[in-house]
Amino acid sequence: MEDAHATILDLQSQSDKPRQDAPADERLSFFGVYDGHGGAKVALFAGDNVHQIIAKQEAFKRGDIEQALKDGFLATDRAILNDPQYEDEVSGCTATVAIISGKKIYVGNAGDSRTVLGVKGRAKPLSFDHKPQNEGEKARITAAGGFVDFGRVNGNLALSRALGDFEFKKSHQLAPEQQIVTAYPDVTIHDISEDDEFVVVACDGIWDCQSSQAVVEFVRRGIAAKQDLEKICENMMDNCLASNSETGGVGCDNMTMAVVGILNGQTKEEWYEKIAQRVANGEGPCAPVEYAEFRGPGVHHNFDDSDSGYDMDMDQRSRTVVAGDHGRGPEDAEMIDNEEEEEDLARQAQPVKGEEHDHVSPPTSAAIPDKITRPIVDVKEKIENVVKGEAKSE
């Protein structure tokens, strides 16, 4: 198993100067997924350390979470590189992490794991896959002396940003963010609104089988059926699993998935009931009721008739994306420029009829929790063997 994950409900406690008993609306919670390749060592290191390293950054201590994510990812790379245990390490891993407060969601991403927000049943991207063939990524790769062949960095690596993978980071003349492969993350900042329901953080073992919209609708149906989030994750993975190994790798990869409920000042029970009522009233898309239960391995449904209505920005040039920003510059016109990108990304790039721009309501007083306890979270990894009572699949 090459995946790792981390769930830290009080991130401030990981700082050099931890705050004790931070007020609920100031507490930061951390959720990260790391998909390893070429071995498990870097992913395991990331799962144990990324959150601690971020919390120890000077930017974090002064409340600049965006910069702390950027500094923390690069500091993690340095920590691995400078550790004698990893002197000859060739593995690497993706990293997609969400830091959630009562008012905002900050997402840092390097690689092709993905973080998606469910907004009344519509999938809103909070991260963007880093693929070598993306225009901005390819430009950096070639400028650093690399090349892209068959959609892979130097004909080898199928993603263009990662922790580790130091064989692609050997130029002493280039800054870390300019290397052939970089750990430098894109950062998305989202203001929580009343319509926001949950966040899904998962590796490509899920996204290669299901579109972002399909996953959001599936999770929403499970919540409406009052299922535990752990059960929803388990059902999703069962649906993604290939029925045999003849599918070309689809449904055969490692799978790690976390669902985080955005309580918005409600109790867990009130949160479940509110989403169930919205579904019953037809407020937003939702998977058919039968998808609240296990459907069997290899059943991949993308609900193609559904549309998230959110623009998918596929340009990957190391910039911060402020979710809900109505303004769009010239560089955003290049959102979808590669026919090899996932079909669901292209589909979600088209706004819903009648909507010209992505729209996220600004935060309201109701969106700031007054009695939030902690985000609801369930992480489920699956491999073939039963380990400690958890069904896992690889």
Image: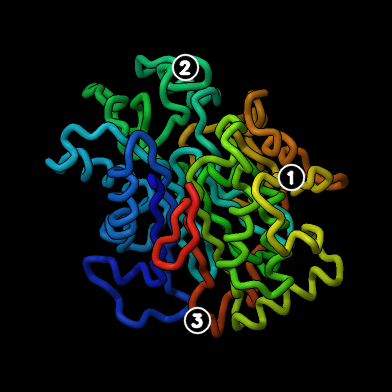
* 280 or 37, nearer to the observer: 37
Image mark count: 3
**What separation in Å lies between label 2 and label 1 (alpha carbons)?**
29 Å
**Sooner in the amino-acid sequence: mark 3 or mark 1:** 1
> Eyeballing the image, is 308 above or below 160?
below
Query: Residue at image x 25%, y 22%?
Result: 171
Q: Which residue is mark 3?
A: 373
Residue 44 is at least partly visible in this image:
yes
State the image coordinates of residue 84 (x, y, percent, origin top left). 12, 41
**What separation in Å lies between label 2 and label 3 (alpha carbons)?**
47 Å
> Eyeballing the image, is 288 above or below 72?
below
**Sooner in the amino-acid sequence: mark 2 or mark 1:** 2
Closer mark to the observer between disc 3 and disc 1: 1
Q: Residues within 10 Å of mark 1 (few under 14, many from 20)?
A: some
Residue type marked 3: Thr
Residue 361 is at least partly visible in this image:
no
Task: Report the disc number at residue 148.
Answer: 2
**What separation in Å lies between label 3 and label 1 (alpha carbons)?**
34 Å
Query: Residue at image x 39%, y 66%?
Result: 388
